[in-house]
Image (spheres, rainbow, N blue to C red):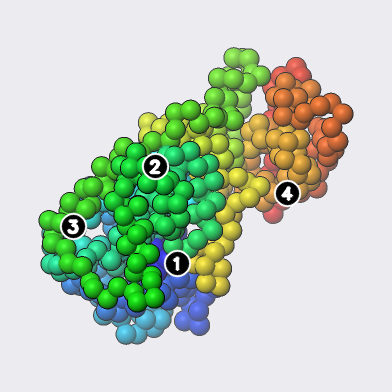
Amino acid sequence: MGARHAGHQAAAAAGRLILPASPTGVRTAPGSFRDPQGQVFESGAQIFRALYAPLAPFPQTWSDTGPLADLVKAGKLWPATPLSPDAVPDDVRAAAPTAVGFLEHPRIATLSFPYEWPFELLKRAALLHLDLHRDLLKRDLTLSDGYAFNVQFVGPKPVFIDALAIEPHVEGRPWAGYAQFCESFLNPLLLASRGCENWQDSYRGRIRGIPTREVARQLGFWGAWRAGALIHVFVNSQVEARAAGPAGNSKTPKITRAGLDLMLASLERCIRKLELPATKAANWGGYEGDNSYSTAQRDRKHEVIAEFVARTRPGLVLDVGCNAGEYTEVALAAGAAAAVGLERDAPAVNRAVRRADGLSKPFLPLQGDITNPSPALGVELAERPALRDRLKPDAVLCLALIHHLVLSEGVPLDRVIRSIVSLAPTGIIEFVPRQDPMSQRIAGPADRLTHAYDLPTFLSILSQTALVTNQILLSDNGRVLIEYRREP
């Protein structure tokens, strides 16, 4: 479903990602048009999937006693409650008059896309996809495709969300999703494991994923062999090239259930062994232990953030420039219900994933750059909504970041402030002055021309956009935590 279902997954996983209300009052998922089996709607706080011609039996497949019940209980498959047409709201039934039935899904708070996942999360999603597929084969079921968009995250834990990708297994029929799985899971993981730092940019630029023939060219024969992916990359790319030739390839291969399981097991072994290069340089991956804070200043920063969160009680906190998630953890411990982190440094954000594993509340670390967030993509720019449209936090933390954006990235201070304040109605922004050692480290020579950057200018600009409610001096050299609240 992936490219086929990206839009309806958006609504099933996060009801905010929807088009304006239709004439019936129900709102529809942007990309549901791709799947003839069903379509997703939102009515009030509820998410419904209309079923037009499901290949798996309805409602037996999704019932509490059906073949998928234990997979839902194990957290591999997102819940789907079967409903008859007369059990859904009138506006939903009117929007899907030919539906033979409906599924109701709970919401996932934050929708994320594969090109925003750190290496560790993409790897987890791939392994879940394969594990679920092998479980389904034991139940005479299979997956119709292999897109990474079929998976979402609750904190750092992956879950499969596309109910209509599950269909009866037909003995001898090849897995149609094999090439899709390689493009959207295996290939980006292989590139990352071989030291390609822009694999996410390559992924983001394609709606299907990274082509196998491109990966084969980059890795070469021996690179694919060393990665344990010779068949899945190099040999598979040759097959694709022959199939795309002038005469095509009309012969359809057959594969037994046992053969398909062996293929899935081979992919699993390959992916499980993949790791980021140990020698990959980190810009800020060690920042928590290498910064200009004293222990007392660090403790004070913890106290300020904890007090702010305990007072405002945000449902979702967005930590922009979260590094390895130290202050995200503080926010969650102080009372935030959930958190999303955004960090562009690969070693740092993968460390944040490991930190998230040990927390009792959901923390989803995403890899990305706030100055270049994921845009809207796909048909009518609606199949994959922009990151900023998917993130609706109640509070934002922007700690030790704006000096990077102004002094290093060259973004004017007024644009930085407007961008951060637009993310959430309240938050804390840390101002790091020019004389701070970390600012001097990133600003370059003293005579380098940069945009205006000082505390009075910062406060003046922020006051034009929001109410400055608190200022806490952290260090003698002028680090300040500034709390803001947007005017209604």
Q: Kindly identify which residue carries mark 4.
A: 418
Q: Which residue has dot 2 on it?
A: 223
Which secondary structure lies at badge 2? helix
Question: Any mark on residue 260, and which?
Answer: 3
Q: Residue at x 66, y 47 (%)?
A: 371
In what element is the residue under mark 1? helix
In this rendering, the answer to whether 319 lies above or below 34 is: above
Q: Amino acid at mark 4?
A: Arg
Kind of element beneath mark 3: helix
- Circle 1 sits on which residue? 7
How much space separates mark 4 and mark 2, taking CA atoms? 45 Å
* Picture quadrant where residue 474 is located: top right
Helix, strand or loop for disc 4: helix
Are the residues flagged by discs 3 and 1 in contact, CB closer than 8 Å? no
Q: Nearer the viewer, residue 411 or 341?
A: 411
The answer to which of marks 3 and 1 sits earlier in the sequence is 1
Mark 2 or 1: in front is 2
Q: Which residue is rendered at x = 32% and y = 57% of the image?
A: 236
Q: Disc 4 or 3, which lies upstream in sequence?
A: 3
